[in-house]
Amino acid sequence: MRIAVRRIGARLGMAAWLLAVWVLLWGRVDALIAAGGVVAVVIAYAVSRLPAVPLVTRIRPLRLAVAVAELAWDLLASSVVIGWHALRAPRQVRGAVIEVSARTRSELVLLAVTTSISLRPGTLLVDLDWERSILRIHGMPVRDRREADAARDSVMRTERRLMRALVTPEDTAEEEERR
């Protein structure tokens, strides 16, 4: 029964998200737009297999605020570094594809990590192996092994921050198995 309630809750979460996007696309809210959105959501579920919204068992607001602040700092710092290299010697900037093994098994946390690193200038998600939780990112500037390791460590720090902020059933089960 608990699993069924979770599944229904996850589907309702996705339906609410789709309805919100529908309303945002129209730019205003009235009864006709809301009814049309509900019809569009029902049709979308009928003709496709939409994913469920991954559940979060607990959000830690303080840790989430720290993760957001650190993301803002990462955005600023990476913008400065990329800007410096672009102005100083754009033809000499090198990049590398770096493989990062994620600890999380939560799709939500992986999505948050990949979004976070893709927002940063100089970093881009190239590939994600969902089954093995392996991210392949393109990072720049990367001139040597030390800078590649620094880029990998940066992604892993982002993952740790988000795992602390967003507690998910998958990561909770993983922690209990390790004990």
Image: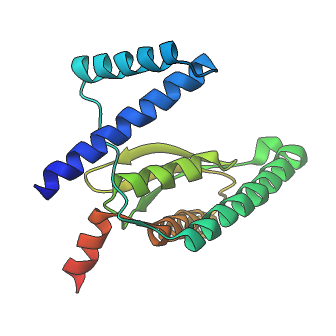
Q: Is residue 100 above or below residue 83?
A: below
Q: Is residue 52 above or below residue 152?
A: above
Where, quadrant-wise, is the N terminus in this rendering? Answer: bottom left
Residue at the (29%, 37%) spot, across then down = 51
Q: Nearer the viewer, residue 140 or 22?
A: 22
Q: Position of residue 59 (x, y in %)?
A: 46, 66
Q: Is residue 120 above or below residue 178?
A: above
Residue at the (69%, 65%) spot, across then down = 69
Residue at the (28%, 39%) spot, across then down = 11
Q: Position of residue 81 (x, y in %)?
A: 79, 56
Snapshot colouring:
rainbow
Dividing the picture into quadrants, the one containing residue 176 is bottom left
Q: Residue most toward the right?
A: 88
Q: Residue most toward the bottom?
A: 179
Q: Residue most toward the left?
A: 1
Q: Position of residue 35 (x, y in %)?
A: 42, 17
Q: Nearer the viewer, residue 168 or 40?
A: 40
Dividing the picture into quadrants, the one containing residue 99 is bottom left
Q: Nearer the viewer, residue 22 or 67?
A: 22
Residue at the (59%, 73%) spot, across then down = 62
Q: Position of residue 117 (x, y in %)?
A: 58, 52
Instruction: Indicate left or right for 134 with 150 as reference.
Output: left
Total tally of numbered discs in the picture: 0
Where, quadrant-wise, is the C terminus in this rendering? Answer: bottom left
